[in-house]
Image: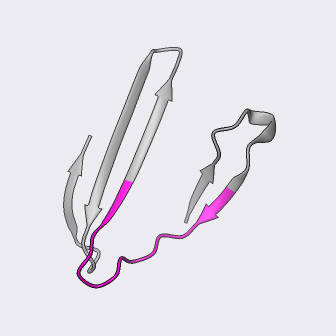
Amino acid sequence: MQQVITGQPQSMQHVTDVMWKKSSLGSFKCNIHASFSSHLNFVDIGMCIRDDSEDFVLAKT
């Protein structure tokens, strides 16, 4: 389970619980994470690709 928070001002943010779903046969799923720091002037992005058997295929940061 993952919580998703909208990119709105904190007083208007909406939190949603999201369940990961397996990809359909013969396809891949790409999960992406990003973080931002205006204080440090820094952006970080990571991704992970899994196949329809949920086996790891590739990751990048």
Would you place residue 60 above or below residue 51 in this image? above
Q: Position of residue 9 (x, y in %)?
A: 73, 32
- Residue occupying the point 28% across, 85% down: 25
Residue at the spot x=70%, y=53% of the render?
15
Q: For the C terminus, give its image quadrant.
A: top left
Residue reaching furthest to the right: 11
Question: Residue 41 colored magenta?
Answer: no
Counting from the top left corner in percent of width and height, residue 21 is at 45, 75
Q: Main secondary structure of the magenta part?
A: loop
- Looking at the image, residue 31 sits to the left or right of residue 60; the answer is right
Quadrant for the N terminus, please: bottom right
Q: Residue furthest left?
A: 57
Residue 40 position (above or below residue 17): above
Q: Which residue appears farthest toward the bottom when viewing the image? A: 25
Name the residue located 64 percent from the left edge and 63 percent from the top edge: 17
Q: Position of residue 53 (x, y in %)?
A: 26, 80
Whether 26 is among the magenta residues is yes
Q: Which residues are magenta?
A: 16-31
Specify the quadrant of the image occupied by residue 7: top right
In the rendered image, the vertical position of residue 42 relative to residue 44, given as above or below: above
